[in-house]
C-alpha cells in the first residue's frame, strides 16, 4: 500500500481528484495518509476532513523565522510516514532538508508543458497569463519529481491542452485542470503505486509491468 501525503495551499481540486481516484479504484493500492496546508483558510483542508483524512495547517505566519517553519513542515510530513509526497498546488518553497530526505519521493503538478512557463514566479493564473501573452496555441500540464531547483526535476507525465480563441486566463486555467491536471496527477500516482516508475540518470523510466 502506497502511503501518500498531499500538500496544498488553496481550493484543493487536484486533491479532490486524488481522493476520488483512490475511492473509485483508478488509483489502486494507495491511501492518503494526511493533508498539509500552509494556509489555514484553504478549502482543501475541508475537502480532506469531509473525506475522513487527517489534515493540518503549518503556516509560516505561526513561526518567528523561516528556519523554524521549515523544521515544523518537515516534522509534520514525517508524522504521516509517507512513501510519496504529492504537491497539489502547494505554493511554498520546500526546505532542502525535506527534498534530500525524500529524494525521488516528491512529485508536483505544474500547469504548463515544462520547460515552458515554469520556474520562479510562474504559479497559478500567472502561468496562464504568460501563455496567452506569448500567443501559444498549445499548453497543458506536467507531473514531475521535485529536486532543489524550481520545476526542474525529472518529468513523469505531460498532457497537452489546446488554447482557444477568446480564452481568458481563468477559462484556460479551468480547462487545463479538467483536461490535464486532474487526469495525469492521479495516473502518475497510480503508476508509482504499481512500482512502474523509476529515475535513472536524471530521467524517468516507466516500465510496462509492475515490479
Image: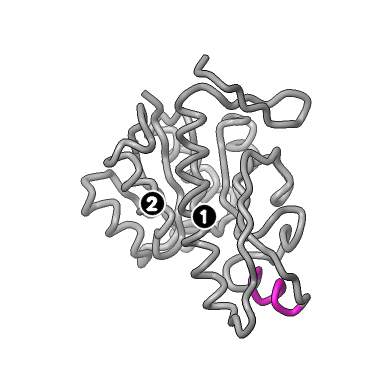
- Circle nearer the N terminus (1, 2): 2
Point out residue 25 in the picture as x, y percentages from the top left corner.
Answer: 31, 36
The residue positioned farthest toward the top in the image shown: 211
Is 42 left, or right, of 144 in this rendering? left
Quarter of the figure with residue 79:
top left
| CA separation in Å, label 1 and label 2 | 9 Å
The residue lying at 43 percent from left, 31 percent from top is 82
Is 143 left, or right, of 77 in this rendering? right
Disc number for residue 181? 1
131 falls in the magenta region: yes
The residue lying at 35 percent from left, 27 percent from top is 29
Is 195 left, or right, of 123 in this rendering? left
Residue at numbered disc 2: 17
User: Which segment did they paint magenta?
Assistant: 127-133
Between 206 and 86, the one nearer to me in the picture: 206
The residue lying at 57 percent from left, 73 percent from top is 172
Dominant secondary structure of the residues highlighted in magenta in the image = helix
Amino acid at each position: 500500500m502506497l502511503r501518500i501525503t498531499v500538500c496544498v495551499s488553496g481550493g484543493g481540486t487536484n486533491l479532490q481528484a486524488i481522493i476520488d481516484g483512490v475511492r473509485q479504484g483508478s488509483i489502486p493500492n494507495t491511501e492518503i495518509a494526511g493533508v498539509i496546508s500552509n494556509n489555514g483558510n484553504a478549502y482543501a483542508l475541508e475537502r480532506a476532513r469531509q473525506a475522513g483524512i487527517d489534515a493540518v495547517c503549518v503556516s509560516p505566519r505561526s513561526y518567528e523565522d523561516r528556519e523554524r517553519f521549515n523544521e515544523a513542515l518537515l516534522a509534520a510530513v514525517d508524522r504521516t510516514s509517507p512513501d510519496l509526497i504529492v504537491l497539489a498546488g502547494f505554493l511554498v518553497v520546500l526546505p532542502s532538508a525535506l527534498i534530500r530526505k525524500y529524494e525521488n519521493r516528491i512529485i508536483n503538478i505544474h500547469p504548463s508543458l515544462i520547460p515552458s512557463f515554469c520556474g520562479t514566479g510562474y504559479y497559478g493564473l500567472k502561468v496562464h497569463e504568460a501563455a496567452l501573452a506569448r500567443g501559444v496555441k498549445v499548453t497543458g500540464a506536467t507531473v514531475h519529481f521535485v529536486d532543489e531547483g524550481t520545476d526542474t526535476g525529472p518529468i513523469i507525465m505531460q498532457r497537452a491542452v489546446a488554447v482557444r480563441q477568446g480564452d481568458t486566463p481563468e477559462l484556460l486555467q479551468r480547462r487545463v485542470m479538467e483536461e490535464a491536471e486532474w487526469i495525469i496527477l492521479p495516473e502518475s500516482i497510480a503508476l508509482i503505486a504499481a512500482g512502474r516508475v523509476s529515475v535513472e540518470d536524471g530521467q524517468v523510466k516507466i516500465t510496462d509491468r509492475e515490479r
